[in-house]
Amino acid sequence: MKKIIASIICAISLISSCNLNNYVYASENEKSLTQIEEAEINKRMNEYYQQNENTMVDFHLLEKIDEPANEQERQAIQQEIAKIDYDMKSSDKSGISTRDLSPNAPTGTNNISHTYFASGDMILVHDGYCTYGYWRHAGLYDKYYDNFITATPSQGMTRQTWTKMHGYDEAIGITTYKYISGNGDVVTYARTLLSKQIPYSIQNANKSSINYMYCSLVAWKSWEQGTKGKTTTTIPVGGEYYTVNYLEIDNNQGTFCLPDDISVQNSSVTKRFAWSD
């Protein structure tokens, strides 16, 4: 999957990068990034995939999780899941200076703006190397409380502050083309998940249940259930198309919905609108 995303990013990175301010966010007139900002993000992500291609998780293998061909393949799948689990746990430490971001040390903080975040928008953060993608953590914004609903290994379902999200080297805001003004049902469902005190797990979680959660699955499940029966999404699969009765924010539509799956620039559903490094 990551090779596919990388090729998409490479294809749309037509604008050369330039020096950018450390504080970048959408213009007041339009909730979106400029072409130059989009190109710089695509460039960074594409370079990241190319540099780490041989050590990142094999997502094609993970898609066989429900029907492994043999015991050897089943064990290989579990090893790939363990990589994701380890890296997600490294995102959970309380302080930027103590987090294990091996092999790369933390490189800074970000100052992403609160201004254009509406309820239901998502934040993705990057810092150091991560086996499952460029963006290592995600949260769903709850405007009423001015914080993010997510899931972490140490707390399960929880809320995280702007201060926490500013403690990563880079952050990006993701919204949707529909329900841009903040869909109450999406956040209401996320609050329901929070109230259930659902434990964290990447190995046991799946899209069809709420027995376990991880950060970006919280966002996916909230958008699935919060928009169910209120809209449709047409999804390309193997050269054909089918329609679901909710807003599908997973641009890969795979077994897992990881932060990178939400961040694809040319998606017809999700849209980047704020960025800071």
Image: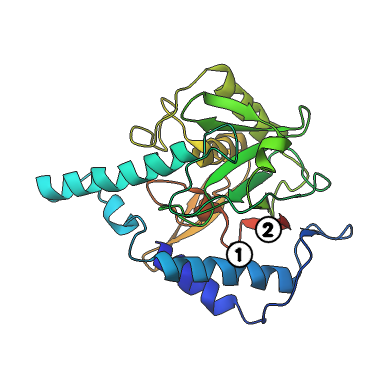
Name the residue tied to disc 1.
265
Q: Is residue 240 visible?
A: no
Nearer to me, 162 or 253: 162
Relative to 63, is 204 above or below?
above
Q: Position of residue 228 (x, y in %)?
A: 57, 38
Relative to 12, is 142 above or below?
above
Q: Position of residue 51 (x, y in %)?
A: 43, 69
- The residue shown at (51%, 55%) is 260
Nearer to me, 101 or 224: 101
Using a 10 Å C-alpha cutoff, classify the residue at mark 2 as few (fewer than 14 neighbours), some (14 to 19) or many (20 or more).
many
Using a 10 Å C-alpha cutoff, classify the residue at mark 1 as few (fewer than 14 neighbours), some (14 to 19) or many (20 or more).
many
- The residue shown at (53%, 33%) is 93
Name the residue tied to disc 2.
272
Residue 61 image-quadrant placement: bottom left
Is there CB contact under 8 Å for labels 1 and 2? yes
Which numbered disc flags the more N-terminal residue, 1 or 2? 1
In the image, taking residue 15 as reference, residue 28 lies left or right, namely right
Could you give the CA–CA distance between mark 1 and mark 2, rounded to whole angstroms? 7 Å
- The residue shown at (40%, 51%) is 254
Location of the N terminus (image quadrant): bottom left
